[in-house]
Image (tube, coloured by chain):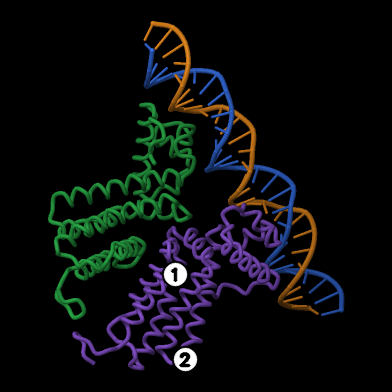
Chain colours: A purple, B green, C orange, D blue
Amino acid sequence: MTADKPLRADAQRNRDVLIAKAREVFDAGDFFDLRFDDFARLAGVGTGTLYRHFPTREALAEAVYHGEVAALCDRARRLQATLPAAEALATFLRGMVDHIAAHEGLARTLATLMADRSGARAEGGRALERAVTDLLAAAVRDGTVRDDVDAGAVMMALHGISAAHDRPDWRAEADGVITLVLDGLRRRRDWSNPV
Amino acid sequence: MTADKPLRADAQRNRDVLIAKAREVFDAGDFFDLRFDDFARLAGVGTGTLYRHFPTREALAEAVYHGEVAALCDRARRLQATLPAAEALATFLRGMVDHIAAHEGLARTLATLMADRSGARAEGGRALERAVTDLLAAAVRDGTVRDDVDAGAVMMALHGISAAHDRPDWRAEADGVITLVLDGLRRRRDWSNPV
DNA sequence: TGACAAATGGAGATGGCCTCCATATTTTCG
DNA sequence: CGAAAATATGGAGGCCATCTCCATTTGTCA
């Protein structure tokens, strides 16, 4: 999938600088006040270079998004390797809310730029869903989480959280949703499914 | 709020034509393939007229959105006046899903255009929430719906539904969510809150 | 009906987006 | 190592969508 061609050293360097600068500007929420050409200057490259690497604003957004997703998946894997399953899941989800809260501008900018028919968005979503599925599966194997709920539900909750960013007290509600989800997932003796 | 100034007759006519044509083009999903000036031609007015009424694509989107919200609120009020409360609520929510399903292009276009800091979006959301609140309150008064859940939860569900439009079998899932919500709202004898 | 106000439309200025290519840098190979 | 080939760079300039401006038309009011 990402096996295109090995980039020349300087090209790779420029590409990385562009993505890093983009994340920075996205996060600050300043991206739409900027001419695309000026963004090139800001990153210290010529416009030609910018356009070769990223033909459109959207392409740039997709690259940033891709990196973000990769980092999150990585984090999920690391947590799963070092913590008990249930704890790994909880830590990951709570961390997700922290992450969204800390990078509101980034989330908003990415959402705006990829609102229209972005294959990358779907692909990233799937990658994240796979990571969550793994976390869940481990917890189910542990016996700490019920086995009749799949990752889709959790993903919808996360999606809802990140989409509702303008709610007055978003943070409290988001934490509430996560608590609800974690609580709901816990395996327990109940009326319909006695353990 | 909308008490600016009475428009001259021809101005009002042009404005209406523009909004109607915009809704049509949005719905077909063709809006982003169009030069803004060409849209003016398509609606049968000069570019000057277009720009006087709607300085930006976003302004046009907000006007369409506003109309859409007004129609939905109207529908809620009409249902509330002619049906038993619980039925009115159910019909409204189901109709909401139908509406979103039938106007996918419109929903997508509006979401794209108003993704960025749109006060109109927030305002429309509040108007819709008020309508749902009224429907709920009536049903609570009837005794057919529990009284410890507010409209916010329902709004989040609707929001999630309209945002997840690209899911493979969106329709089934959406219906599922509505069923879940309606079911959850029904007043009943249960373990924690005996009636 | 006349006079004033409001609205129109489209020609043309403006300025952002993107291409193109002469030059510079990296890599490969003798 | 040095030269040739391959790859990448940057920014001047063309192109075209966006938006403004105003001479003309249309509606309103007395």
Q: Is residue B123 left or right of residue A48?
A: left
Residue at position x 21%, y 70% in the image: B184
Question: In the rendered view, would you say B27 is above or below A40?
Answer: above
Q: x%, y% of residue A180? A: 34, 77
Residue nearest the observer in this picture, D26 or A177: A177
Q: x%, y% of residue B29? A: 38, 51
Quadrant location of the C terminus of chain A? bottom left
Q: x%, y% of residue B11? A: 39, 29
Q: Mark 2 sits on what residue? A: A83
Residue at position x 41%, y 90% in the image: A85
* Total number of numbered discs in the rendering: 2
Q: x%, y% of residue B150? A: 28, 64
Residue at position x 21%, y 79% in the image: B192
Instruction: Indicate which disc, 2 or 1, sits on the residue closer to the N terminus.
Output: 2
Q: Amino acid at mark 2?
A: Leu
Q: Chain of mark 1?
A: A
Residue nearest the observer in this picture, A113 or A182: A182
Q: CA distance from mark 2 to mark 1?
A: 26 Å
